[in-house]
Image (cartoon, rainbow, N blue to C red):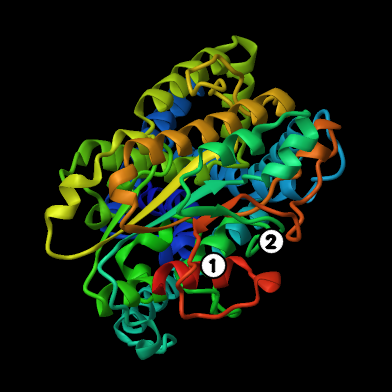
Amino acid sequence: MKFNKFSFIYSIIIILLPFFYFLESNIKNFNSEYYIAFFLLIIISIFVSSILGLVLIRFFNDKNSEKFLLFSMFNFIMIIFFSYLYSYFNNIFFENRAEIVFFICFCLFLILIFSSKLKKFFLFFCIISFILTTGKILYLETNNNISNKKITNKLIYENFKINSKKDIYIMIFDGAISLEEFDEIYNLDVKEKFLENLPKEYIYHKNIKALSNNSAESIEKIFNFNSTDVNKKLLNFPKILKSNYFKDTDLKKFIDMNNLNFYFFGNSTINCSTHNINTCPNKERNKAKIYFFYLNDILEEFNHLTLFKMLKDKVYRKFTLEERLNIKILKLRHQMNIPLLNFSFEKFNKNEKNNIFFFYNYLPHEPYFYDKNCEFKKNKYNYNLNYFDGYRDNYLCMIKTINEFFNKNNQNLKQAKVIILADHGFPLKDLIKKKYSPIDKNQNIFIITNKHEKCTIKLNSGTQKVNSLLIKTLKC
């Protein structure tokens, strides 16, 4: 084989460039485990690309190593150009958008092959882009490390010093509409039955609006007591739990100033063991599981709109692999899910410190693999969702989960402060009619707190909001 070292170097640069673009966009969300998984993915990609390059050389019966370069160019075009054009044609070519974009990209690839001038320009562009992107990554990483060392003081400490020796429970359910709206849509009496079983120490609040119409902003406002920086990029939960970000939140400062323990409970999709081990009740690290999660996380986002993702989806649908695979995955997620009622909080109360327990549960959001008794039911994932039946069963499972949580932990909760709320509403009425509309930030949500009858913070009940109820729960 005629080996051209410059062609090989160019090939490696072009293969690495999409990864560097991805790293540039996501560097603030990377921790050490993400970096290890990321570089492992790069090594795997270079190895696979080399093998495919050799196959290409054998196929053409050509001993010229420049075929490596052709493959890397094809790979770059089908990742970067394909995803850009696929997004650009978002509102047209609905039926055959992927095929049309592939045809355009393949024509571009052929032009690069047969035009030496364009090929040289493409290589020049890739090399300059690689240098600039690498420089920007180094700058962002350095700047990120410096900014992490700065101490911020948004919170007025003396206002949040507490004297009560009570544990605090903050529980978030994803997209839970108000009981009133749920009963109206389904013609049920869930609210009446639920309030009959609700312990007398707690109250369900009507007409409370969410902090936002999306999870990222709502969670960040809860972690920062509604004092978010409008210039800061919102962090998708649970990335805000990572130590680099969590340490600067108002909630973390509240925990530190009051000498509290903090425990995070997620479910099988959002799990503390894969995001921030320091917040988990069980601190055993399953490194293989963690790195697998990170690797899968990066791959899903990296290949989101690429040709390779489209091909995988088409093959899966053609042979119904996706449905069979998703049922297995959903069943595993259901089995691994951590319902609130499985925890006994007595073991945490042996510690001299008081605790904050933070829960995030995907209910009643899709995937709709729960029946009303929280048992697993088969369901197609993300295709032709039956919102009417699916949301109803997930919502009823949420109600059952909350009831059992109160029943099982009744003694502990009598000396505790609790807030159970939705991060945002859900456009259920429109989705039932097959209308895909954004979530209304003025939609009423599900929310329960202590009654706070003896609370010294006086707030007009007519103007109570999530933020004021959260402050009451923390302070009173």
What residue sits 50% from the left and 66% below the top? 222
Label count reads 2
Q: Secondary structure at mark 1?
A: helix
The x, y position of residue 213, in whole percent, is 68, 58
Q: Is residue 109 above or below residue 367?
A: below
Q: Is residue 147 above or below residue 416?
A: below
Q: Which image quarter: residue 433? A: top right
Near-viewer residue (447 or 268): 447
Which residue in the structure is indicated by mark 2?
Answer: 209
Near-viewer residue (438 or 208): 208
Q: Earlier in the sequence, mark 1 or mark 2?
A: 2
What residue sits 21% from the left and 73% below the top? 259
Q: Which mark is residue 201?
A: none
Q: Which mark is residue 469?
A: 1
The x, y position of residue 280, in whole percent, is 25, 50
Q: Which image quarter: residue 163? A: bottom left
Mark 1–mark 2 distance (CA, rounded to whole Å): 12 Å
Q: Is residue 339 left or right of residue 311?
A: left
> The residue under label 2 is which amino acid type?
Lys
> The residue under label 1 is which amino acid type?
Leu
Q: Residues within 10 Å of mark 1 (few under 14, many from 20)?
A: many
What residue sits 59% from the left and 9% below the top? 319
Q: Is residue 116 left or right of residue 403?
A: right
